[in-house]
Amino acid sequence: MSHPDASERYSRPAIWLHWSVALPILVMIPAGILMIQEGIPRDTRDTLFLLHKNLGTALIPLIALRVWVRLRHEAPPLPASMPRWQVRAAGLSHGLLYALMIVMPLSGVIRVRAGGFPIEILGLSGAGRIVPRSDALAEWASLVHWASGVMLLAVLALHLGAAAHHGLILRDGVWRRMAPWRR
């Protein structure tokens, strides 16, 4: 069984960026789902909205940095024993994850700002309106945010399932390429 050595791991900045973006996303998903449920107390709903929109907005520069680092540095090679279809599926799913990590927060910001609502973290930063007040734009952005959220859940489930498969069943070292610790 061949395992990646240190040179076959992602770089420390790539690993740090992966987990710095992944963990908040894993918090925002349930917050985003809960905040739109009926029967949630108003103060809880307001807290979830504040968390979701401000954390999502705050992640935009970190996601941009993550994409930039990924574009500048090739991923470590996958095991030669990996079937070609899995290599292609991994490339496609990673590309979709990056695209959705860009679309999700941008469509969320557009939805909130076009809907006439504040994003407190943008107010603190001194950022202006960004987009005009428009119910039509807000509705379109809301649809994009929802649809990309459904796609993100699907691709994320595939990603997590593949990581678990490689880490727990195959034990081929693929999961350890992005592990936050080194052996």
Image (tube, rainbow, N blue to C red):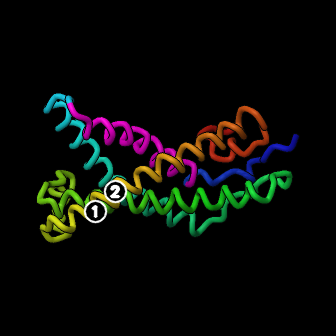
Q: In the image as oriented, which residue stretches furthest toward the right?
A: 1
User: Where does the image place residue 182, in percent across and percent down from the top left?
Assistant: 67, 39
x, y (%) of residue 108?
29, 57
The quarter of the rendered structure image containing the N terminus is: top right
In front of the other: 125 or 102 = 102
Q: In the image, what residue type sits under mark 1?
A: Ala
Dot 1 and dot 2 residues touching (CB under 8 Å): yes
Q: In the figure, is residue 123 to the left or right of 183?
A: left
Q: Position of residue 101 (x, y in %)?
A: 44, 57
Determine which quarter of the picture holds residue 160: top right
Q: Amino acid at mark 2?
A: His
Which of 79 and 150 lies nearest the eye of the viewer?
Answer: 150
Residue depicted at 62% across the width and 40% down the height: 161
Residue 26 belongs to magenta span: yes
Main SS of residues in magenta = helix
Please indicate whether residue 46 sits to the left or right of residue 156 in the image. left
Find the magenta span and give its range. 14-38
Label 1: how many residues lie within 10 Å, few (<14), some (14-19) or many (20+)? many
Number of marks in the rendered image:
2
Residue at 68 percent of width and 47 percent of height: 177
Q: Report which residue position mark 1 lands on.
A: 141
Q: Is residue 136 left or right of residue 33?
A: left
Is 60 one of the magenta-colored residues? no
The residues tagged by marks 1 and 2 sit, at their Cα atoms, a distance apart of 6 Å
Q: Quadrant of residue 63?
A: bottom left
For mark 2, what is the residue? 145
Taking depth in this image into account, of 23 and 11 the one nearest to the observer is 23
40 sits left or right of 27 in the view: left
For the point 36% across and 58% down, the residue is 60
Looking at the rendered image, the quarter that the C terminus falls into is: top right
